Amino acid sequence: MSPLRRTLRYLRPHRGGFAVALVFVGLQAVLEAARPWPLKVVVDRVLGSEPLGSSWLDTIEKPRLLLLAALAVVLIQVTLSAIALLQSTLTVGIGQRMVSALRADLLTHLYGQSLGFFGRRPRTDLAYRVTFDTFAAQSLAMNGMLPMLSAGVLLAVMGLVMLRMNVVLAAIFFAVAPLLFLTMRLISGRIARIATEMSEDESRLLEETQRDFEAIHIVKAFTAEASEWAQVMRASRRALASAFRLYFVQTGYAGAVSVLLALGTAGVLYAGGLLGLAGQVTAGDLFVFVSYLAALYSPVDSVSKALGVVQESSAGARRVFEVLDSEPDVRDARRARRLGTVAGAIRFDAVSFAYPGQGDSLALDGVDFQAEPGSLVALVGPSGAGKSTLVSLIPRFFDPSGGRVLLDDTDLRRIQLQSLRSQIGFVPQAPLLFPLSLSDNIRYGRPGTSDEDVRRAAEVAGVADFAERLPEGFDTLIGSNGQVLSQGEAQRVTIARALLRDPRILLLDEPTSALDAETEAAVVAGIEQARAGRTTLVIAHRLTTVRRADQILVLDAGRLVERGRFDTLRKAGGLFSRLHRHALFEAEA
Ligand SMILES: Nc1ncnc2c1ncn2[C@@H]1O[C@H](COP(=O)(O)OP(=O)(O)OP(=O)(O)O)[C@@H](O)[C@H]1O
Ligand SMILES: [Mg+2]
C-alpha cells in the first residue's frame, strides 16, 4: 500500500471533521470569486448606467446600491476571515490527532523491538522518525491534499464565472495559469533541492560543534583546538554558502512569477480595452478579470507548494512505515506462558550466539552450564570473552542463535517477556542514570515504591554513604544538569535500583569495577546479605566476589573453558589461575 493511502487511514476516524473542512473549501472559493464584484457593481451601475443583468439589483436606487456594495466588501472579508480561522482550527486539530496516533503506533512498535534492532540503527535517526517524520500525516492531509482541493475548486469557480462573462478574456486567463504553474514547479523544485542541501549543511555544522563541545575534554587534552576550529569553520562556510544560494533563487523566483502575472494582466488589459471599445465588455467586467488574474497567484502557488509537500511528506511517511513494518525479532510466542513464582534455576543448553550482522563470528560458542536456584555464580574471563553477551541472553535482550536458555526448565522463548523481565534485576556494565532525582533513579521501574524501601535498598548498595553529602540528599537531581556522580557512585545507584525490584534473579555486570576495595567489600557483603535465596550471576574481576561463589565459570573467546570452585580452579593451572595471579591478587593486596 502506498504511504499516501496508509496515511489516509489515520484520517478515517476524523471523516466528519474533514467533510466540514471540504464544505468550507467550497464556501471559500465562492467568496473569493465574489470579492471583485462589489466594485464592478459600483463602476458599472452606480457610476455608469450599465444594467447588471439582475432585475432585482437593477431596481435599487444608486445611493442605496453604493452603500450595499460597500457593506458587501466588509461582509465578504469578515466571512472569509471567520471561515479561515474555523478552517485552520479544524484542520490543524485533525492533523495533530493524526500525528499523535501515528506517533503512538510508532512508539509502541519501537519499544517492542529488540536490542539487536536498536544496535543496527543510529539512535538520532530513530528519534528523527518519531519526532519529525510523523508530521508527514498532518502535512499530507492538511498541507497537501486540502490546499490542492481548495485551489482546484477556486480555479473552477473563477473559470466558470469568466467563461460566462467573456470567452476571449477567459482564454487569456487560462493560458497564463499553466505557464505560471510550470514556472513555479520548475523553480520551486530547485528551491527544494537547495533547501535540503542547506538543512543538511546546517545539521552537519550543528553535529560538528556539538561533538566538539561534548568531547571538549579530549580536544583540550590533545591540544586539537586549532584543527577542530578549522573543521567547524569549514562546515560553517558551507552552510552559509548554501543559505546564500537559497536566498538568491528565492528572490529570482518571486521576480519571475511577478513578470508572468504582469504579462497576463497586460494581455487582459489590452484585449479587454479593445473589446470595451467595441462595446462587448464593461469597465466593471475588465476590473473583475484583472482582479482574477491577480488572484491567480495564490491558488497556483498553493498547488505547486502542495505538490512539493506531498512528495516530501510521502518520504517522511515511508520512513515511519518502514519502521512499523519491521517485525520485532524478540517477542512473545503465540502461547507464551506467564511466570508464576520462580525457583530461579538457570540453564544454558549448548548456547551459541552471533550478534546480528556479524556473520558467523560467534560471541558465544557451545556454552553449557546450570545455575542452581539461590546460588551465586561468578563469570570471569578476559576482555571481549563474551561475559556481557552471556548475561544479556537471560533477560532475552537477544535470543541465542543455537541452543536454549532455560529458566526452571522452561525455554525462555516460551515465557512472556514482561513476566520474565519482572523477575530479573539487572545492573549493566555501564551505569545508566536518568535525569531524575537520586531517589527516583533508584525507584525507576517501580514507580510506587515507598521512600523507606528506597532507603533500605540504598543502604544495602552503599548509596546512603554518599547520599548524605549531596546538597539535597535523596532529592538531589542527577545528571548533566544536576549533580554529577562519580563512576563508583553511579554504579552503586544502579545496584540499589536492581535490588529494589527484589528479583528472583540478579544479574550484575562488573557492578563494583569502579569501587575501591573497601567500599566494594561493603557493597558485596550487602548484596550477599540481601540475596536471600535468589540466583545471582555476577561478572567480576575481584577476589572478594569470586571467592564466595558457589560456581565460577571461566569464559574465553566465547567458550566455557573451566568451571568449579575457587580453590580448585586456582590450583588447576589453567586460564583462571593465570588471571588470578595477574589481576586478582592485586585487588587483594
Ligand atoms: N552489540 C554488539 N554487536 C556486535 N558485536 C558485539 C556487540 N557487543 C559485543 N560484541 C562483540 O562480542 C564479543 C564479546 O563481547 P562482550 O561485551 O560480551 O565481552 P565481555 O567479556 O563482556 O568483555 P569486557 O570484559 O570487556 O566487558 C566482543 O568481541 C565484542 O566485540
Ligand atoms: Mg562486558
Image (cartoon, rainbow, N blue to C red):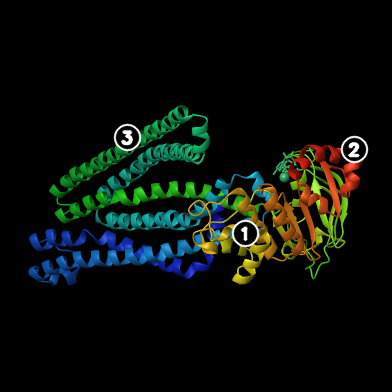
Residue at 91 percent of width and 41 percent of height: 572
Residue at 16 percent of width and 46 percent of height: 273
In terms of secondary structure, where does tag 1 sit? loop
Image-quadrant location for residue 438: bottom right
Is residue 147 in sight in this rendering? yes
Q: Which residue is mark 2?
A: 573
Q: Quadrant of the C terminus?
A: top right
Which of marks 3 and 2 precedes in the sequence? 3
Task: Classify residue 372 as left or right of residue 93.
Answer: right
In terms of secondary structure, where does tag 3 sit? helix
Tell me which amino acid carries mark 2.
Answer: Gly
Tell me which amino acid carries mark 3.
Answer: Phe
Image position, residue 71 (x, y; %): 17, 68
Q: Which residue is mark 3?
A: 248
Which of marks 3 and 1 precedes in the sequence? 3
Tell me which amino acid carries mark 1.
Answer: Val
Ligand 1 within 8 Å of disc 3? The answer is no
Q: Which residue is mark 1?
A: 463
Location of residue 355 with respect to 16 vertically, above or below: above
Q: Residues within 10 Å of mark 1 (few under 14, many from 20)?
A: many
Which of marks 1 and 2 precedes in the sequence? 1
